[in-house]
Amino acid sequence: MTPEETAAFRAENRAGEVYTVHIIFFVLSIVSVLARFAAVKFQGRKWTWDDWLAVASLFFIVGVFTGTMFWLRFGLGRHEAVVLEEDPMNVQRFYQTIFANEILYPMGLACARLSLVILYNRIFGLFTARYYLYGTMAFIMAWSVYATLPLILACKPVENFWTTHKNCIDISRLYISIAVGSIVTDFMLMILPMPYAARLRMSWYKKMLLLMSFVFGGFNCFITIIRLVKVSTFDYKDPTWGTVDLMIWTGLEAYCAVICCCLPTLRPLFQCHRLRRASEAAGAKDKLKHSDPSTGAETLVEAAPDGQELSEVPKRPRQQAPDRTLEDSFKEFDFGTTTLNDLRRYGLRADSDSYMEDAV
C-alpha cells in the first residue's frame, strides 16, 4: 500500500456508529421498563411474573451494553492489524468479552420473550391459547439452553476460544442456527395473540391499538432477520473491523427485545394522559361558570372578543336526588331481563374486555 493508503487504513474507525446506536437504544430500554412500572402503579395492581422477567431481561441487557463498551475499548471499529500494533493482548480481551456476552445475550432475550408469553397468558389464558403459550414457553427455554451451552463448550479447552482458536466447532454455523431459532420465536410471539385479540369484546379503536401493540411487540423479528444476514456475511479475518455491523444489530436485537416486551403494558399511561387532558378541558369550562348568590342558580358566562361579558344564560338550580332504599332499587331492577350491558353498568367484570384491561 502507498503511504496515503496506509494512513487511511490506520485512520478508519467506526466506533462512533457503535457508541451512538447502543447508547440510544440502551437508554430507551431503561425508559420502557420504568414506564412499565409506572403503568403498574397507575393501575394499582401488584407486580407479576411478567414484570419481574422484564426487569431480569434488563439486568442481562446491562451486561450486554457493558460488554459492548469493553469491545470498543479493545478495538471494535478499527482494523485488527492496528489494534495488534497498539497492544497484542487487546484482541484476546476482545474475544473474552465475546465469550461473556454469549451467555448474557441469549438469557436477556429469553427473559424478555418469557415476559411476553406470561403477559399473553394473563390476557388470553381463558382461551385455548394457553396450550400454545405453554408450548412457546418450552420452545423459548430450549432455545436459550441451545444458544448458551454449545457456545460455552465450543472449544476444548475453553480458553482456546480467545487464544489459539483451535480444536473448536464451526462457530459460524452455530451462530446461524441460533439466529434462525430466534427468528422462529419472534415470529410466533407476533402471530400467536392476534386471533385471540380480535375476538375480544371492545371498540374497534381499542382493538386496533391492542393489535398494533402486538405488531410492534414482534418488531424484533425483523431485526433478527437482518442480524442473521450479518452473521452469515461478517469477516472472520479482521474481526475487530468486520464484526461492527454484527455487533450493532446484536445490540439492537437485545435492546428492542426489552422495549417490545414492555410496549403492550403501556396502554394505561396513554389512558392517564387522555384523562388528564379531559380533566383540564373540564376545568377550563368550569372557569366560565359562576353562581348567582341571590338564587343559588348557576349562570354560564360567554366572553366577548374584548373580554367583556355578552350574556348570562341562567341554569336551573341543582336538585338533590331523593333518598332511595335498597328495596326500591331491587324493585326497579328486573333480574329476569338482566343483560351483559346491565351487569357492566353495575361494575361487574362480565366480559373479556374488562379482564383484559385489568391484565394489561
Image (tube, helix red, strand yellow):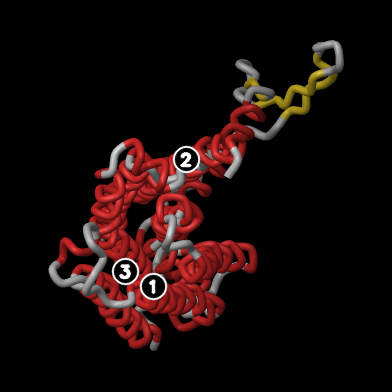
Residue plotted at (54% across, 66% down): 226
Amino acid tagged 3:
Leu
Q: What distance separates the C-alpha of mark 3 from that of mark 2?
A: 33 Å
Q: SS for tag 1?
A: helix
Q: Quadrant of residue 328?
A: bottom left
Q: Which residue is mark 1?
A: 172
* Most distant residue in the left direction: 157
Horizontally, residue 295 falls left or right of residue 177, namely right
Q: What distance separates the C-alpha of mark 3 from that of mark 1?
A: 27 Å
Residue plotted at (20% across, 71% down): 155
Q: Name the residue nearer the viewer: 207 or 146.
A: 146
Image vertical order of residue 123 relative to residue 303, above or below: below
Label whose residue precedes the other's in the sequence (3 or 2): 2
Instruction: Find residue 342 and report its horizontal and vertical position in percent.
Output: 50, 71
Q: Residues within 10 Å of mark 2 (few under 14, many from 20)?
A: some
Q: Name the residue nearer the viewer: 226 or 139.
A: 226
Residue 15: mark in rendering = 2
Horizontally, residue 273 falls left or right of residue 324, namely right
The quadrant of the image that shows the N terminus is top right
Q: Is residue 332 visible?
A: no
Q: Which residue is mark 3?
A: 114
Q: SS for tag 2?
A: helix
For the residues bearing labels 1 and 2, Cβ distance under 8 angstroms? no
Image vertical order of residue 268 relative to residue 319, above or below: below
